[in-house]
Image: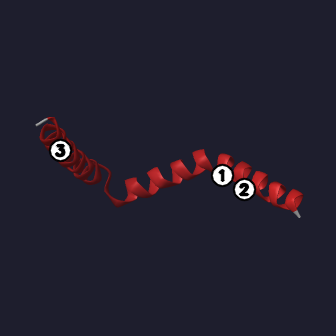
């Protein structure tokens, strides 16, 4: 019985997430999504570069 309730809740949450996502999509539009992606890339860019650099250094040490 509890498993059925969990599945029903999961389905409701997924549907709510889809509805909110669609509402946000309409609100931002194409240009808004581009800007959002650009901001995300800027925020994560330094961290990604750092991780890539660490990975390359680790590979050099293994050789």
Instruction: Judge left or right: residue 31 versus residue 9.
Output: right
Circle 3 residues within 10 Å: few <14, some 14–19, many ≥20: few
Mark 3 — residue?
A: 7
Q: Residue at x 52, y 49 (%)?
A: 40
**Which quadrant is the N terminus positioned in?**
top left
The reply to whether discs 2 and 1 touch (Cβ–Cβ < 8 Å) is: yes
Q: Is residue 51 above or below residue 13?
A: below
Mark 2 — residue?
A: 52
Q: Which mark is residue 48?
A: 1
Front-most of 7 and 53?
A: 7
Residue 43, quarter of picture = top right
Estimate the x, y position of residue 3 in percent, counting from the top left. 17, 40
Q: Residue at x 66, y 51 (%)?
A: 48
Q: Residue at x 56, y 52 (%)?
A: 41
Give the mark count. 3
Please identify, in this view, whether the residue under mark 3 or under mark 2 is nearer the observer.
3
Estimate the x, y position of residue 20 in percent, counting from the top left. 23, 45
Sequence-first tag of 3 and 2: 3
**Which quadrant is the C terminus positioned in?**
bottom right
Residue 5, quarter of picture = top left
Instruction: Judge left or right: residue 26 versus residue 34.
Output: left
Q: Residue at x 83, y 55 (%)?
A: 57
């Amino acid at each position: 019985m509890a498993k059925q309730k969990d599945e029903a809740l999961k389905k409701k949450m997924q549907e709510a997430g889809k509805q909110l996502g669609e509402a946000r999509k309409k609100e931002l539009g194409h240009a808004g999504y581009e800007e959002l992606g650009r901001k995300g890339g800027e925020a994560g860019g330094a961290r990604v570069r750092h991780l890539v650099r660490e990975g390359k250094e680790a590979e050099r040490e293994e050789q």
